[in-house]
Image (cartoon, rainbow, N blue to C red):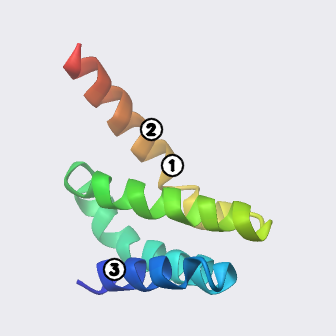
Amino acid sequence: MLVRALAVRAEIFGAADPEAAMSLYADAIRRFSPLFSRLPELHAGLMTAICKAYQAAAEATRIELDGTLLGPIVPVLAQIHRSRESSAK
């Protein structure tokens, strides 16, 4: 899957070039968003991991997160995580 390949590549670049890693994570999020939107429960794990890595890369580079990119994703992930926590209780 292309998204996983981009995330792995970003992970490899992460230490040496955090800006390149951030760009690769953003690309992975952009490409994965349509599929995530169709089946969010199924893809929440991978999307969460990529978003967390994107956030970590942003913190390392002190570059602001792209709110337009994350705007539609974050509330859906938050809802899924709340739902899973409630189910686990």
Asked whether the viewer can see residue 65, the reply is no
Q: Position of residue 82 (x, y in %)?
A: 37, 28
Q: Is residue 50 left or right of residue 63?
A: left
Q: Is residue 14 left or right of residue 46?
A: right
Q: Quadrant of the N terminus?
A: bottom left
For residue 33, above or below residue 83: below
Marks 3 and 1, how far apart at CA: 18 Å
Q: Residue at x 62, y 87 (%)?
A: 20
For residue 12, above or below residue 48: below
Estimate how packed mark 3 is, as few (under 14), some (14 to 19) or many (20 or more) residues with alpha carbons within 10 Å: some
Q: Position of residue 56 (x, y in %)?
A: 61, 60
Marks 3 and 2, how far apart at CA: 21 Å
The outermost residue toward the front is 16
Which mark, residue 3? 3
For residue 63, above or below residue 16: above
Residue annotated with mark 1: 74
Q: Is residue 73 left or right of residue 4?
A: right
The outermost residue toward the right is 62
Q: Nearer the viewer, mark 3 or mark 1?
A: 3
Which three-letter amino acid code belongs to the residue tagged 2?
Answer: Ala
Which three-letter amino acid code belongs to the residue tagged 3?
Answer: Val
Residue annotated with mark 2: 78
Q: Nearer the viewer, residue 44 or 53?
A: 53
Q: Is residue 32 left or right of residue 84?
A: right
Q: Is label 3 in a helix, a strand or a loop?
A: helix
- Ranked by sequence position, the earlier of labels 3 and 1 is 3
Which mark, residue 46? none
Q: Position of residue 23 (x, y in %)?
A: 60, 82
Q: Quadrant of the C terminus?
A: top left
Marks 2 and 1: CB-CB under 8 Å? Answer: yes
Q: Position of residue 72 (x, y in %)?
A: 51, 56
